[in-house]
Amino acid sequence: VPTTYTDDSTLDPTKDIQEYRIYIRLESGAYSRGNYYPVSSLDTSITITEINAQINSRAEGVYYFVATALDTENVESYYSNEVRKEIF
């Protein structure tokens, strides 16, 4: 989970987080802030299941993912560490 805002201030995990955002790319590197899957902070289990289905229904290949957190003031964190998944 991201721990730093884009202004370098520390993300307080006790603050109300309105959503997490999952960004997906076909290659490692720069992510577009506008292309993400929103994940509600209130009910992540359903949304995570939906995202998992979306990911696994993609064409074979290698995909790269990062996550951010968005607080109630619409301030988005830095990207998390990147994760790689290969779909067969």
Image (cartoon, rainbow, N blue to C red):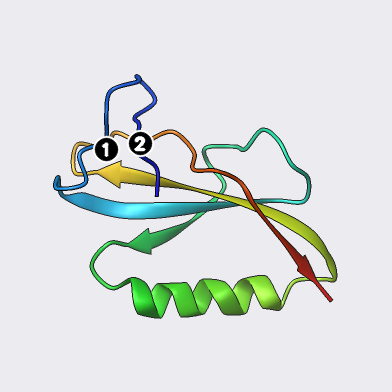
Residue 83 rendering spot, x and y as whole percentages: 63, 53
User: From the viewer's perspective, is 64 left or right of 20?
Assistant: right
* Rendered view: 59 above or below 25: below
In which image quadrant can residue 27 be found? top right
Q: CA distance from mark 1 to mark 2?
A: 6 Å
Q: Nearer the viewer, residue 59 or 82?
A: 82
Q: State the SS at label 2.
A: loop
- The residue sitting at 35% across, 20% down in the picture is 8
- The residue sitting at 77% across, 51% down in the picture is 26
List the residue tagged with mark 1. 74
Of badges 1 and 2, nearer the viewer stands 2
List the residue tagged with mark 2. 76
Discs 1, 2 touching: Cβ within 8 Å: yes
Residue 41 rendering spot, x and y as whole percentages: 27, 62
In which image quadrant can residue 53 be found? bottom right
Q: Which mark is residue 83?
A: none
- The residue sitting at 80% across, 59% down in the picture is 62
Q: Amino acid at mark 1?
A: Asn
Label 1, residues with CA under 10 Å away: few <14, some 14-19, many ≥20: few
